[in-house]
Image (cartoon, rainbow, N blue to C red):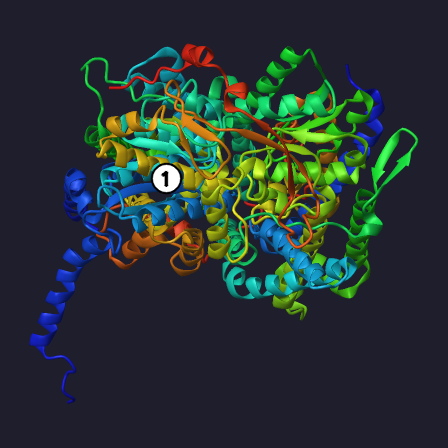
Amino acid sequence: MHDWASIGPQIFNGLVLGAFYAIVAIGLSLIMNLTGTINMAHGSFMTLAGYLAYTMVLRGTSFWFALIAAPLICVIVGIAVERTLVRPLYKREPFYSLLMTFGLSLMAEEAYRLIWGPNGVPFSPPGALAGATSVGFMTFPAFRIFIAVVLIVAIAALALFLTRTRFGLRLRAAVQDTEMIAALGTNTQVLYAVNFGLGIFLAGIAGVLAAGMLGLAPTSGNALLMPAFVTVIIGGMGSLFGSIVGGLLIGLTISLTTLFVPAASEVSMYVLMAVVLMIRPRGLFGEEGIFG
Amino acid sequence: MSARGELIGAAIVIAVLLFAPFLSPLIHLDVSIVSEVLVMAVAAMSVNLLLGYTGLPAFGNAAYFGLGAYGAALSVKYFQVDFVAAVVIGTLAAFAGALILGPFLLRRRGIYFGLLSIAFGQVFYFIAYRYTDVTGGEDGMNFPRPPVALAHVQVKETAFYYVALAVFVAALIAFRAVVRSPFGRTLVAIRQNEVRVRYLGLNSDRFIFVALLIASAMAGISGALFGLLINFAYPLQLDWHQSGDFVLMMILGGGGTLWGPLLGSFIYVLGKDIVSTITPLWQIFIGGLFVACVLGFPRGILGTIEQRLRRAPGTFTADDVNAAFDPNAPVEVGRGV
Amino acid sequence: MARPVLSRRSFAKLAGAGSAAAVFGIPAYIPRLGEAADAIKIGLLEPYTGVYAGPAENETHGFEMAAEAWNKRGGIMGRKIELVKEDEQNDPGVAAQKARKLVNQDKVAALVGTVSSGVSLSVAGVANTLGTLFMDSGGHTDDVTGKSCHWNVFRTCHSTWMETHATGYALQKHFGKKWFLITPDYAYGHSLETGFKDVLAHIGGSVVGNELTPLGTTDFSSYLTKIDAAKPDVVLVLVQGDDYTNCLKQMNQFGLLKKYPVGGPQVELEPLYGLPPEAREGWWGIEWYYKSEKTLGKGNKLAQQFVADTLKRTGGKPPTARNAFGYITLDRLAQAMHDAKSTDPVKVARAIEGVHFSSIFAGSAYYRKEDHQLMWPMWVAKIRPNGTPGDKYDLFDVTDINAAEAVEQTIAQKAAVCKLGYP
């Protein structure tokens, strides 16, 4: 009864979906690692990027410009939020930031509804990415291939940034020992702000791409948030590599269970999470000592 | 606050609550929404036990709350049980949920515990959503409010209010007894320094598990009553947004205080009802309340007041709890054992 | 020392005035401003926040226009209609509490509104307990006029049974009998599936694939890849809301919209305007349309006026089926109160049911006596992706019209599940 021929495309689709979760989870994870902030407004930033890109394209800019510009505007908004609202919470228990950003996401949803209206808006990728490529028995939508490429490039660039640049190295050092890096003369507040902006930038890119593949409405970003949290837990907090593996694993699990056991497709990622935690309580690549 | 002062304060609050059904129409509120304040206060108390006292970010208590509501709804719909039995079954359903989830949740502390609570709570949400034939799925399920079998009486709105009040007062007394017992003080010790508690030879996991079970029963009884109040069970009751509401109520009133959850529920439930009547933009106000509360008075209203009042020697007040609940204290990284 | 700004006496006066204002002013203020003492109040429950905020807004326009029309004519029995609005937040629990508040505190004569089925069921239950009329303008589940029907509950929009049967017969006529279903895996989807399978049993067709998709599915690829292997005559998309948008966008990206005809039980203009033109495709059930003689009726002055008035109100955004639901619902409720010369729920309910009337749509209709479902036509339309020249909103080319009796369950079928239970 299973259609074995659809496994190939399904694996591809699962990986694309997983890359989405991974990039959102990396953003969450970056912010979480350095400052202990659980950003529940992450989905709101994704939605914001989608709407900004929509508005830009409507005003006549190209999709390509919007793909970069919209996330950058989100970064500005994000850093402003970080400096004014999140920073006072760094020394407190993490759940305060969770609550505060949850409140922000409620406000953001209402604000989007006021600005862009309660109904979804049409946003589609440019004509060059609209078609589908047929490779024998498989059909690859061009936009999905594009998404996969963008996500891989973004993740690779991030990895290079963190391992090859002075700033990236400081960032990683600060995750290990913030006091030491401060004592050595690095301005940690700048680190915090840039790090937050980086996380938001990744969310922004994911937001624009998601708006092209899915719908765009005031509530749409929140749908990707929960899988991203599960990704962080499975991959292990404190590990960017873990987020990548976790995201791909979840993407594959979801798409393969939809194929074979459709009834379990929503619950499958939670089952996966339970299994991982039974075997490795810190997640697959979790580091010792971060958030217990 | 002295013991006498506390008694007088409690007497005043209870007296006001006794007359609330007659006062609420004066400010254009229905009795049922005042009942909701009491019912939600019990759920906020369950968060208070875990988060306010034990220091565990309980962001999944809606799972127990929803299990309570569905437990009551299903038992009334399919087995025609009476009012009391529906509440008991709902509570037991929530208790059973915590028995199953407990061993998983116990493995982690800190914010990890919170994320796990959210994620596992969502599993119940999906179950309610999916098993349409039994639960009514997304549409939820209507069920009549059953009579109390022994007394052969229907529970009308005002009567329901007094049932809710009785449950609330009982929960409050039980809660006070728990947090003042050696068990409760151990919970506070766990939030202050779990490693030290372990060195003293206490199995902190076991304490946390029992706290979780007590909290789940409280959330369950609250959920069962809420289901009976609105005669409806639906998946959103299990959703993590609902958990967020409970946490906000607790923080708003004052974490680690006895009366905080009631005050928080009072402000949140009535505030949302009134603001959403005045403007469709109520979500901005509620969101703003989260932000203002966290930034402005993280100890909550009662926590801030109690901190200011000098306490009489020999009494145990929220200050003892808040000593470790100090939001400005640095985060202990790697507190896990 | 400077003189105190406030003398003690004036301070005492001020404090006295302040506390008097607090005691008397606030309770006096909270009941809505500007209410007329003798107005007939109608409680309007709509999800102004959440995913259905768009349809809620449009239904409200319809309700308000009907109220204004009646008030211009002098109201009901000389009393003005006053709508008391509450945001039910698309949450059945909130809706139940708001319904109680409207009935017990605002003393409304009847409740109207709602978009989602869960909220409709919850409000119907509360209204029944309180003995108040409830007219469900927009919650589609069969149960409202089926298993969970009540004497005090009426429904204006079509039932899911009507939607599936109207479109099922039309799709068979246009394309054939081999169907591929994409069904949302929750209550609403399951009742649609049941409806379509009933149609197939009548026409002797077959389901060559039925994919159950969880609500909130972001990635439809796993379901879409199965379509090619099944080779259906037509793909039926049963998912709604955001999922509908996701599904159609992805079908387009997989090139499926060019390969297979696509259709479904219903589509609303609100989400359709949110789709990019290349993903607007197919044959769908529609519940009313602002620009077709088939839906409005030839030379229907009332309907033309309704469309013109709405356009004036909204600054050029045409009315959708939601506007029509609101208008028809309140207009019929007011008419019944007028006819019964009373706001007594039982008398008004008796005055609504069974009465044939014509309104802003083609032909005549009536709320069926046996189950309180509005029996009005259901239409099928083909989508024009880019509208017509000069009107980008004009997306439907209405093709078929189905009489209500032909597509709704029969009285005998309904009698088996629905007991109205008048007091």
> C412 or C274, which is in the foreground?
C412
* Quadrant of the frame with the C terminus of chain C: top left
Could you say whether the residue bearing mark 1 is in a helix, strand or loop?
A: helix
Q: Please indicate, yes or no, whether residue C397 appears anywhere in the rendered image.
A: yes
Q: Quadrant of residue B42?
A: top left
Q: Give the residue at mark 1.
A: C330
Q: Residue furthest front?
A: C299
Q: Quadrant of residue C240?
A: top right
Residue at image x 62%, y 26%?
A: C167
x, y percentage for residue A116? 57, 56
Q: Please indicate, yes or no, whether residue B208 appears anywhere in the rendered image.
A: no
In this rendering, would C130 be left or right of A220? left
> C289 or B2, which is in the foreground?
C289
Q: Residue furthest bottom?
A: C1
Density class for disc 1 (Cα within 10 Å; few <14, some 14-19, many ≥20) is many
Residue at image x 54%, y 39%?
A: C298
x, y percentage for residue B22? 15, 40
Residue at image x 53%, y 22%?
A: C161
Q: Quadrant of residue C102?
A: top left
> B137 or C301, which is in the foreground?
C301
Q: Residue furthest right?
A: A136
Could you tell me the amino acid type at mark 1? Leu
> C380 or B7, which is in the foreground?
C380
Subunit bearing disc 1? C
How many numbered marks have been drawn onto this rendered protein structure? Answer: 1
x, y percentage for residue B326? 41, 54
x, y percentage for residue B333? 57, 50
Residue at image x 48%, y 51%?
A: C310
In this rendering, would A11 be left or right of B232? right
* Quadrant of the frame with the N terminus of chain C: bottom left
